[in-house]
């Protein structure tokens, strides 16, 4: 595994650290491959209950490595298509991952880095954090991240963010639905860990089924969503966590 991505598991929490602080954790092909590799490890580890993604240094992630993109200017269409597909595949891995993924954001989460943060199931941000899609400022298109943003905010706000390329503070990101929580800088680590611990305390099977169903019903008809819900409901009744939970509930005075 690349040293651009650090990975550890402790007490049910898998931690993925984007580790290029000198480059503001800019994403290149090696780093994306590394993230996908450790996500796969976490998915296979039955001890893992929550996955946390964070950035080393002052920023979460500045987006794609522009030097790497510049080198691809001389490449053909298929090579550029393959490179762009790497990011899309990472987002699919995150969406399909059986465990809840939490992004803890300090500093800036920009462009593809904003995509990685907001593709997580939960986004916890420090008060001073900033989010944005500056691609249009260099004549680029925030194309792959658009699918994530549009599922979080209104069409009007999404277009404004994508076209202007302006950064927004964490509080604004919270208000428009991009992220889940904002904590004071001084207490960010403790508050984030408390939130992560709450998620880790939930039933692994119930959380996995809930995440899968929620993302499955996105974009399908109401009738199809109900049918998918019926199937998941029946499956959930057969899990050990459900049986144990019912027994404990019925024992209460």
Image: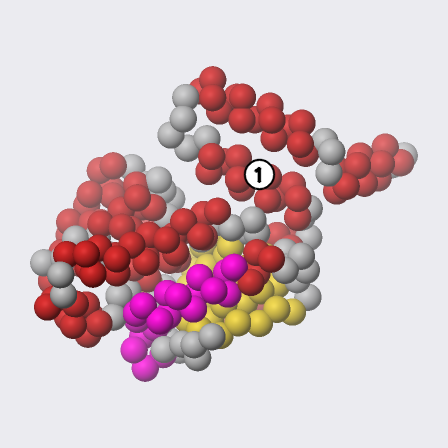
The residue that label 1 is drawn on is 210
Q: From this viewpoint, which residue is outermost toward the top?
A: 223
Q: Quarter of the image containing the C terminus?
A: top right
Q: Please provide percent x and percent y for residue 244.
A: 81, 40
Residue at 50% x, 65% y is 38
As displayed, is residue 40 above or below residue 208?
Answer: below
Determine crowd level at label 1: few under 14, some 14-19, many 20+ residues with C-alpha closer than 10 A: some
Residue at 59% x, 39% y is 209
Q: Please provide percent x and percent y for residue 247.
A: 85, 36
Left or right of 220: which side holds 13?
Answer: right
As displayed, is residue 147 above or below residue 170?
Answer: above
Left or right of 177: which side holds 96?
Answer: right
Q: Please provide percent x and percent y for residue 252.
A: 87, 36
Q: Please provide percent x and percent y for residue 101.
A: 51, 55
Q: Which residues are magenta?
A: 21-40
Q: Nearer the viewer, residue 117 or 31?
A: 31
Per the image, is 6 magenta? no
Residue at 14% x, 56% y is 77
């Amino acid at each position: 595994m690349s040293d651009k991505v650090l990975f550890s598991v402790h007490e049910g929490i898998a931690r993925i650290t984007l580790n290029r602080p000198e480059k503001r954790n800019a994403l290149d092909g090696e780093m994306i491959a590394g993230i996908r590799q450790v996500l796969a490890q976490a998915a296979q580890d039955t001890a893992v209950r929550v996955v946390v993604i964070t950035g080393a240094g002052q920023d979460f992630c500045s987006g794609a490595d522009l030097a790497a993109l510049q080198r691809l200017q001389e490449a053909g269409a298929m090579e550029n298509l393959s490179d762009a597909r790497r990011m899309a595949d990472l987002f699919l891995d995150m969406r399909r991952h059986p465990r809840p993924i939490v992004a803890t954001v300090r500093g800036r989460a920009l462009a593809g880095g904003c995509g990685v943060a907001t593709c997580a199931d939960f986004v916890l941000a420090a008060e001073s954090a900033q989010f944005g899609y500056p691609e249009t400022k260099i004549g680029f298109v925030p194309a792959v991240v658009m699918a994530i943003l549009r599922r979080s905010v209104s069409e009007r706000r999404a277009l404004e963010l994508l076209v202007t390329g302006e950064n927004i503070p964490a509080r604004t990101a919270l208000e428009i639905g991009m992220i889940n929580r904002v904590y004071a800088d001084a207490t960010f680590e403790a508050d984030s860990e408390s939130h992560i611990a709450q998620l880790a305390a939930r039933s692994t099977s119930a959380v996995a089924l809930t995440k899968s169903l929620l993302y499955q019903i996105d974009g399908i008809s109401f009738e199809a969503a109900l049918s998918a819900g019926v199937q998941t409901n029946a499956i959930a009744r057969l899990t050990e966590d459900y049986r144990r939970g019912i027994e404990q509930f019925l024992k209460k005075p």
